[in-house]
Amino acid sequence: MTSEGAPGVETTPPRATAPTRTTCPYCGVGCGVLATPDGAGGAEIAGDPNHPANFGRLCSKGTALGETLGLDGRLLHPMRRQADGSFARVSWDSALDEIAGRLAAIVARDGPDAVAFYLSGQLLTEDYYVANKLMKGFIGSANVDTNSRLCMASAVAGHKRAFGADVVPGCYEDLDLADLIVLVGSNAAWCHPVLYRRIMRNREARGAKLVVIDTRQTASTEDADLFLQIAPGGDQALFSGLLAHLAATGAVDADFVAQHTSGFDVALDAARRLAPDAASTARLTGLAESDVSAFFALFAETPRVVTAFSQGVNQSAQGTDKTNAILNCHLATGRIGRTGAGPFSLTGQPNAMGGREVGGLANTLAAHMGFEPESIERVGRFWRAPRMATQEGLKAVQMFDAVAQGKIKALWIAGTNPAASLPDADAVREALGGLELLIVSDNVRITDTIGGGAHILLPAQAWGEKSGTVTNSERRISRQRAFLAPPGETRPDWAIFADVGRRMGFDGFSFSSAAAVFAEHAALSAFENADARAFDIGGLAQLSESAYAALEPTQWPVRHGEAQGRARLFAEGGFCTPAGRAHFAAPATPRLAEALTPDFPLRLNTGRVRDQWHTMTRSGASVRLANHTLEPYVDIHPDDAATTHVVDNGFARVATARGACVLRVRVTTRQARGQLFAPIHWTDQTAAQARIGALVGPHVDPVSGQPESKATPAAIAPHAFARQGFLLSRRPLTPPGRAWWARAAIRKGYGYLLASDADNLEWIEALRSLAPHAEAVEFCDAARGLYRAALFADDQIELLLALGPTPVSWEPWLDFFAAEHLPAGPRFAFLSQGTRAGGGDASPVVCACHNVSAAKIEAAISEGCRDATQIGAVLRAGTNCGSCLPEIRRMLAQAGRTPS
């Protein structure tokens, strides 16, 4: 619904006789999607075969997008917190007038730096642009940062230090044409599976080699020709050693270095002091000297090398130095911007790059300009801005420190959940409660951040409802297009920011559409550019509404008069520094931010699982995605498990100096000794005691401001519960008492894995309080320690509880729970039998794309399937995104088959 006085806010998507071409909202691969509404609020999803990022392929998460489009839990109307802490619906006019008035009053009283915006890499470029214009040009502060600070800031800082600009020089086609691909700190098989399949096809068709450098064994390491299990923090030592080796063996491109770079001698001297040879490099990195030598030789002898890096490099207190150590090796060999050769930063979020293009980070202005006086003046003149920010703002961790200190009085958070995702997340949530004004724009009603003390909630449109652009990892701008009518009173984020700007009395915010915002953004990129800035999309500045609607995926730069962009940059120099030369940076000696202590003797590494995304707001709604990993866990090596007395499939308390979690234990040799791994996805909305962000220390890279999320000192100890089981519910709830729980999507409701010390009486009383009018039935087998209870409403199950001394699977009960009408018969007998008609497959899902369980794959192997290709032919498993292929190959190997 359009609020009064808001011109041109689109309220319905255009009618289409064919599927809508749009872009996936998950990672930075930026896959094209074909979405066909099903008439019931959802859509059928397929990959777009004409999109150059994916050519029709989608990963498991993208394939399941149609299952995530419901309105359960959606924020549909503006809300204001009441005196008793509850939220009440208010009008858009009331909410926006209050925001505009209170922001203006705080700025007048305390100055513009008392206000801050914290944005998301999942916003569209148009959303980002209007927010940054409002804050940096009109409110007058650069206190705008984004959760991209948590994933891409070190890559950005490294690119700017080396190239003079935040530019990824290569393209996805290089992954098809390289003869050596080096993955550094990237489990691309799970986190960027569509790109990983391109790497695998190159390997199969052209014989390309794959080197994986990581601190732990992942799905990506299983396909590697060489796996380097590096010690935490060792990346710049490894690539410094490589630089020294390249110089010693004559592999440096002396002409490229002389003509197009500066600082080589200083960087080489530093590399030689740090890691002069393979032996010293091995000592610094915890690697075998033979493996180091093999990697050095492969890199030196292979002209077409792509080094792709991601969070294992970025999320470090030395992430910028790690990035530059990698870039140094490519600059030294001239392997940059050439076909099949170059460094490649794999972006974490769908529009982290688009946000950076418009100044989404606190240390940048729009259009890749910085806070040099001439840039401040140029942007201010273009915007006709009355109050330009004149210095860098606070980066994310600094920003929330300023909130805690009372320096920031008002904070507007859009599309992200910092009370779960930032380091030291408990302190962040506590700080939010002290704000004078906390505004949250989101599409869900409750998050850890909203629960931290939000005053005003603004309902934002979600994927499928909003329209705009995103930029992927290869600098390709693609359209996200609406294919669903926006529900309730939801609005695009850009329109919300623009409306507040108008209500604060500012000119320059009368945008009629997302296309109008994009046109201004494109025009600014070309304004007084003269090829000085690589980011230039001036050739798109004059697009009509219809041309913008039909915009094909386009790589930048696209300058005035150009019909298309450029796939590769810098092969012939032309860097974005004043002299046009790239700069070699000398990395510091490797050092982790925190030392181990007797109290915290292990390193906690954090990351993602295959089928979930961030805090599961979207992906958690899919039943098939939930089935791969149902609960939060911690991985530990068997030797460390024996020392700390934790057991496989038991529970453990993982603690750091900041907080503690209780997690399921997975004992595995895939985890390195001395290290733990735990995924980041669970929040207080989806689990008890599993917010991993609360454990991570707030130490940041001094250049990028990115936190070190991969090496926090930690301790682990056993944590026992008397009983374990599950609770199935028709609606979301918080399990009663002191139970440990984790929530997952199931058909027709919500499933909660449980662990508890409560007795049967406590449980049945708690269940009755949740559904007081339902009929309660109990079953108890004291000899085996089994307890079941169910609440029935008419002939449906409202709640179903099962507990036992060991984990209890809910699989045999799911058909009964999902049934609209239960079979006739005594309900006590139903509880006591514990089976369902036709049996059940209680094994985990291996292939989420085609919903193929481990049991089905095991059966196919026993029936004669000898390799992954045969499994795919019989079950289709592994034939879409391929992220399950490593697991399928492991199962084949365990069965004595030879994987293909």
Image (cartoon, rainbow, N blue to C red):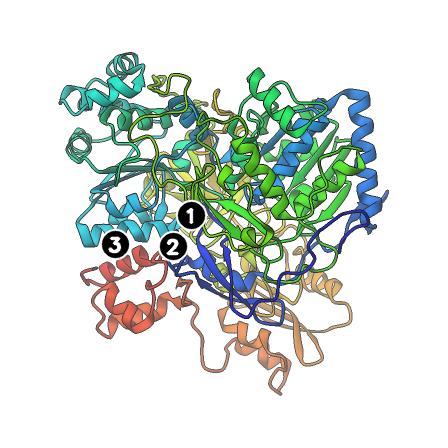
Which mark, by number, is residue 29?
1
Image quadrant in which the C terminus is located: bottom left
Whole-percent x and y of residue 39?
Answer: 61, 72
Can the viewer see residue 711 in this picture?
no
Residue under label 2: 54
- In this rendering, is residue 180 above or below 610? above
> Mark 1 near mark 3, Cβ–Cβ under 8 Å?
no
Which mark, by number, is residue 455?
none
Kind of residue at badge 3: Arg
As helix, strand or loop, the secondary structure at mark 2 comes to loop
Kind of residue at badge 1: Val
Q: Nearer the viewer, residue 841 or 530?
A: 530
Q: Nearer the viewer, residue 315 or 804?
A: 315
Image quadrant in which the N terminus is located: bottom right
Whole-percent x and y of residue 642?
Answer: 36, 41
Residue under label 3: 201
Number of marks in picture: 3
With 111 as the anchor, is 827 left or right in this view? left
Which residue is at the far front?
Answer: 561
Which residue is at the far bottom?
Answer: 824
Please tell me which of labels 1 and 2 falls first in the chain. Answer: 1
